[in-house]
Image (cartoon, rainbow, N blue to C red):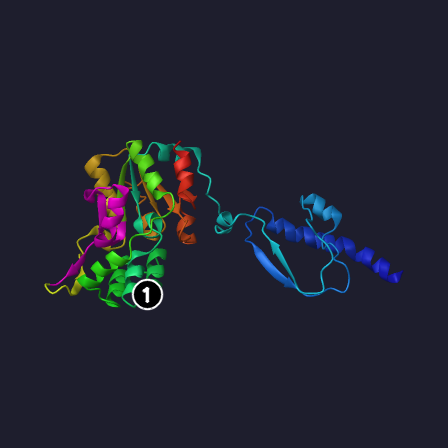
Amino acid sequence: MKESCQQQETEPDRSKEQEKLMEGLVGSQMTPITAHCKQLSSPFLPVFSPRFMKKFNLCLIGMSKFPKSLNLIAASVQPLESAKLGHFDNTLPSKDVLELWRNANAVCFDVDSTVCLDEGIDELAEFCGAGKAVAEWTSRAMSGSVPFEEALAARLSLFNPSLSQVQDFLEKRPPRLSPGIEELVKKLRANNTTVYLISGGFRQMINPVASILGIPPENIFANQLLFGSSGEFVGFDTNEPTSRSGGKATAVQQIRKAHGYKALVMIGDGATDLEARKPGGADLFICYAGVQHREAVAVKADWVVFNFRDLINSLE
């Protein structure tokens, strides 16, 4: 009896603690979790009180006694796409953002981890035997933690690709396009929207991508690898605006000035893509997080998408 009274006295306190915890969770994103539970000596008892569960609209599904062996409990509160964003969610476009997207005269795409599933320089480095070291520099460059030109020079110096290596790479490693990108580009072109590729990668590797998508060479803004008379690597063309930080913004400004587009959209995954949204540049930045999710970039985007299907459907 004494024990029963103690349980009644502690029940309100426990319930209040549960409610306080849940209030901090409701409205936030949670990723799928798994937990191994040790064998219990008694049947499973609900952790939450009925009053608590009613308040937060919770329910128990398929709960039963724990078996003698270890159990695996899996809980998924929200789709992973939203969970990746942490506390921030701009996956639903505002009315103004949607209207601007639908009326864009030109759309500029980043290539690596956007149009394509891979980071081109990382793939080339891996092909040449320096993949891991180069990938670490790429991550720093895309997050904006180091100047792009510094990261580009550092990465190339780690493997110095020769002309023959690049040609061999292109022959053996055809580009892998992101799902839906071909349909999206066709849809944009059918709507008389001009499409550009703006990349910190290399023109030699982007030309095949542009050919698949039907994008003319003059609509490509990218870096150029330079080789000597014997095919040895000698550097990259520093006159290309995309070879340095802020270069994509410069390229977008040049495009807009040359053609007088009234509405221009930039789509990409990195800090250099975000930089393109500035006066005289892109009116709208859409963060494509279907390959790489960089939260520092996504949190500043006008719209975050994890699948090009979202953009295709919004045009219909």
In the image, what residue type sits under mark 1? Gly
Figure quadrant of the N terminus:
bottom right
Say which quadrant the C terminus sits in.
Answer: top left
Q: Is 99 drawn above or below residue 163 in the view shown? A: above
Q: Is residue 206 magenta?
A: yes
Compared to residue 120, the image places residue 183 above or below, namely: above
The image shows a total of numbered marks equal to: 1
The residue sitting at 29% across, 35% down in the picture is: 189
The quarter of the displayed image where residue 5 is located: bottom right
SS type, badge 1: helix
**Residue farthest toward the right in the current orientation of the protein:** 1
> Quarter of the image holding residue 42?
bottom right
Mark 1 surroundings within 10 Å by alpha-carbon count, few (fewer than 14), some (14 through 19), many (20 or more): some
Q: Magenta segment range?
A: 199-228
Question: Residue at the front extreme?
Answer: 172
Observer able to see residue 283? no
Q: Is residue 33 left or right of residue 85?
A: right
Name the residue located 24 percent from the left edge and 38 percent from the top edge.
256
Q: Nearer the viewer, residue 2 or 204?
A: 204
Q: Position of residue 194 (x, y in %)?
A: 26, 36
Quarter of the view holding residue 224: bottom left
Q: Is residue 211 magenta?
A: yes
The residue that label 1 is drawn on is 131
Could you tell me residue 257's position as x and y percent?
Answer: 21, 38
Q: Is residue 172 left or right of residue 297?
A: left
Residue located farthest toward the left when viewing the structure as drawn:
229
- Residue 128: where, in percent of width, then height? 27, 66
Residue 119, given in percent of the width and then of the height, sits at 32, 56
Res 118 visible? yes
